[in-house]
Amino acid sequence: MSKYLLALLCGLLFPLGFAPFDYWPLTILSISLALYLASERVEKNTFLLGLFYGIGQWGLGISWVYVSIHYHGNQGILSSLLITTLFIFFLSLYTGLTFYLIKKFRTGNKNLNYLLFFPVVWVTVEIIRSYLFTGFPWLIVGTSLAGTSMGGWIPILGTYGASILAVMISGSLVLIVRNKKKIHWSPALIIVIFLLSSFTLNKINWTKEISIIQASIYQPNLTLEEKWSSEGVRKTMNMINNSISDAQEGEFIFFPETAIIFDKGDLHTWISDIEKQAKSRNISLISGIIAKDIQNPGLIERYNRIEGFGAIKGHYDKIHLVPFGEYIPLRSYLDKILDILGINLINTLPGESYSLLKAHNIAISASICYEIAFSDLVRKTANDSNLLVTISNDTWFGASIGPEQHLEIAQSRAQEHQKSLVRATNSGISAIIDRKGNVVNRQGFFEDKQIKESVSIYEGKTPYSIVGNYFIYGYIMLIYMYLLLYKRTNVL
């Protein structure tokens, strides 16, 4: 039983490399211990060992889920703990799978195991977790390096590529420890090369500055009850009116997800007025808004939209929706049951296309809330943009570590494309991030203030912007082909 407890304790180290702790070497160390435990020949039930490691990893890493369920989901303490525990257990199954595959693909060549095969196995499961069952790309190893001097490979290989390199370091550390009686220089050399190359590459500018804009981010700081009340609507409308009045000529103003909770048609007079005011002074207002399905006006369905007003035009409807949060899977089969239970849920419709918001020479790549975690999705518009914007409503998670992790994910997207990123949220954490993934300015939790900051606009593409994750997918396939060939031509 002691080895399972050890695995659980090792798993607890893993999230400490991510925000808000930011001790990324601890994540490297945690993975080293995981690789050592999973590859030991004496251990038979590696899946169970991985499950315990995952319970530690996810138990601390996504503890913020409890806040959403208990405080905002109207669930009691016991039911909230039960739902959170089930979610942690589900994610721990992925970690159990990782341990099992590491044991399954182990060969007689330790160097190949720790430097090639095991890193690929680890990242393979990260990718599967990012897409299976709508995906949960949270706590991706490479994300822990965003905004640090060790993030130099992110604009080239993306966060999955950075994950592979990070796990290679973990494997190198295991090799150094296991071969302490006989010095092997290759693992130590790999660590030195990675550290030096990351530090050097971090100084390369793949994009160039073409202009600077004045940006303002407004954080309404409304509770969920206030946000959807008439009082909250009035407060938000007044804040938007004041933001335009206080703005400089040509300024960009940002409001969070669903800041405007009515369709434009319902607020026609007010929308026309702010449009007129903004246009007269070349002001660009970007805000989250609810949009009705005009093709089926009788249905209780809507779009979660980010839209430009004034000098900026265009809109983007959220495409990657959260199941049971924004839509009901298999709704056509569940409608009768929901009617019997008296549950009348508003269904959010997915957007149909990836579109940019444009103002003069500024093209904005927009994402809404959870979408920022999906690197492939962001890349669809980031390639043709020169500013990244993400809006969210993290009020659901209070002052937990969840919004901090969400911000860190946004940092990795900015670094992948080396473009500034503006993040507007309802109650924190709103921020401006530079092209190297550093937070230039931020608002605290439930802080009723405004960020005013100059934001650099860039043009150009990073290697990752051009190739995306396809290089990493190709590399993973080649390693598996090599592993298959190695297994067939070598007797363990």
Image (cartoon, rainbow, N blue to C red):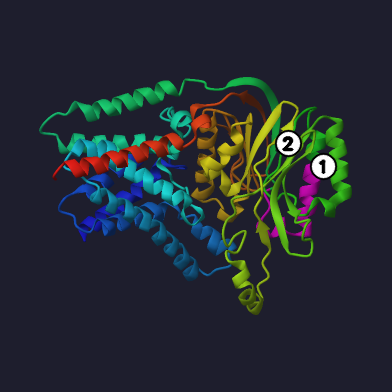
Quarter of the figure with residue 326? bottom right
The residue under label 1 is which amino acid type? Answer: Asn
Residue 411 image position (x, y, % from top left): 52, 36
Q: Secondary structure at mark 1?
A: helix
- At 26% from the left and 45% from the top, the residue drawn is 35
Q: Earlier in the sequence, mark 1 or mark 2?
A: 1
**Between marks 1 and 2, how big is the CA–CA gap?**
11 Å
Q: Is residue 235 magenta?
A: yes
Tag 2: Cα neighbours inside 10 Å, few (<14), some, or many (≥20)?
many
Q: Which residues are magenta?
A: 221-240
The residue under label 2 is which amino acid type? Answer: Ile
On screen, residue 129 above or below 86 = above
Please name the residue that numbered disc 2 is placed on: 253
Magenta-highlighted stretch: main secondary structure? helix
Picture disc at residue 241: 1
Q: Is residue 475 visible?
A: yes
Residue 191 image position (x, y, % from top left): 29, 29
- At 75% from the left and 56% from the top, the residue drawn is 293
The mark total stands at 2
In the rendered view of the protein, which quadrant contains the C terminus? top left
Quarter of the figure with residue 348? bottom right
